[in-house]
Image: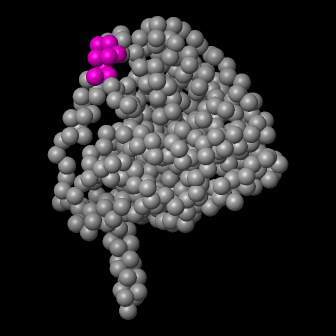
Amino acid sequence: MKKELTLKAVDLTERVLRDFHQKAAESRFPFGFPLKFVENRINEKQEYERVMAIQFDENGVIDNETRPFVPWETAGGFMTDVFRAVGVPEEDAEICTDVLLESDRRGVESHGCNRFKPIYIDRIDAGILRPVTELEILKDTPTTVVADAHDGMGMVASRRVMEMLLEKASRYGLAMGAIRNSSHYGIAGYWTTMATDRGMIGISGTNARPSIAPTFGVDNMMGTNPLTFSLPTDEGFPFILDCATSITQRGKIEFFARNGRDTPAGMVVGRDGRAMTDSEAILKALTEGEASLAPLGGIGEELAGYKGYGYAAVVEILSAALADGLFMKDLTDKNTDGSRRPYHLGHFFLVINPEFFSGEDVFRKKTGDILRALRSSAKAPGAVRIFTPGEKAHLIREYRKNRGVPVGKSLQKEFRELRDRFSLPYQFPFE
């Protein structure tokens, strides 16, 4: 009887959520939201945090990780060797590995080792990602750079352009660059923190294969298009806002699928305007154009989804127009005849040097004062603490520093397969 009641409750919840999203899409909630919807969204967020296996208390990260850890040195050496085995030059392989491991150091597992094989190795194998990056500088002025990556490794192209921009900003105060015909460049926050490591402000964004539908639309027109900021502070870590302009990223849905979890309702809309939750079905539907991610704010205008939609459009324009690159539907991996092709992505980067404004020390102190004021403000009842952007990533880094990268069962399988394929001399802790 208890099981039957539970199943009925689950069915009712799903029907309530579906009904809400249908009505939201049709703008039929003029007087506010049902309390049940709000309660369900809170429950879904709690479940999402549990699935991601990273939770916090007043002291930092709660030590509840059950997956085995692979030491950073082991994971780094292994991934670098695999990159080399598929044709990536050693120096470039080390860059790519560092970007991926940095994701896991910060707890952004959707863009770390979990993407090593499917996003990079598999695409090199398929011939749609070139392992040797032949970066062409199309325009180079005292404060700007425009480059063409010619479908090489986006992480390598981004590293080279950012190094140029940091030098320019050191001399002139501001520098901006754009790259076309690139590929997935990892977490955007990696590039912006290259600036904070030098005491400067970093801003970056990238377009991606179509995933987001415009407000009131169901066609996936734009990518998850992150808009990322990193600011130096006088604390032990920088301010980092690194997030997609969609309500979630494809990588997190891939994470849910790999772990047999449903995607929380409200993140993805189907062609019928209703919410989708089956993670495997969502990934297939996104590829086939039968589903779309909702922009920040969600479906319709009820939770201001038009704001996320607008920010996604800004990133799409800057990622394409500054370098005269491709955009939206041209960023798929399919030709008209069904054959596969490179994604031809675009990125942009902006570096601002505080020394040319208030001064680096003043900027760091003022930024730190603002963040400390935010953290010390009144907490909601039941809340453990208030975090500022970049703080959780710092705490996760500290927690994992001497432990390594946590590796789930599906990733363990991929590591073993790649090791055996290339006859690499590695023994992992999970074996």
On the rendered structure, is 41 left or right of 72? left
Q: x and y percent of residue 254 in the render?
A: 56, 55
Q: Identify the colour scheme used.
A: one colour
Name the residue located 71 percent from the left edge and 24 percent from the top edge.
134
Tell me if residue 151 can be seen.
no
Vertical placement of residue 244 versus 159, above or below: below
The span picked out in magenta is: 358-365
Q: Residue pushed farthest right? A: 423
Name the residue located 46 percent from the left edge and 56 percent from the top edge.
52
Q: x and y percent of residue 420 in the render?
A: 80, 53
- Quadrant including the N terminus: bottom left
Name the residue located 18 percent from the left edge and 60 percent from the top edge.
31
- Quadrant including the C terminus: bottom right
Q: x and y percent of residue 98 in the render?
A: 60, 35
On the rendered structure, is 281 left or right of 310? right
Query: Is residue 360 within the magenta segment?
Result: yes
Name the residue located 64 percent from the left edge and 37 percent from the top edge.
97
Q: Main secondary structure of the magenta part?
A: helix
Q: Residue pushed farthest front? A: 402
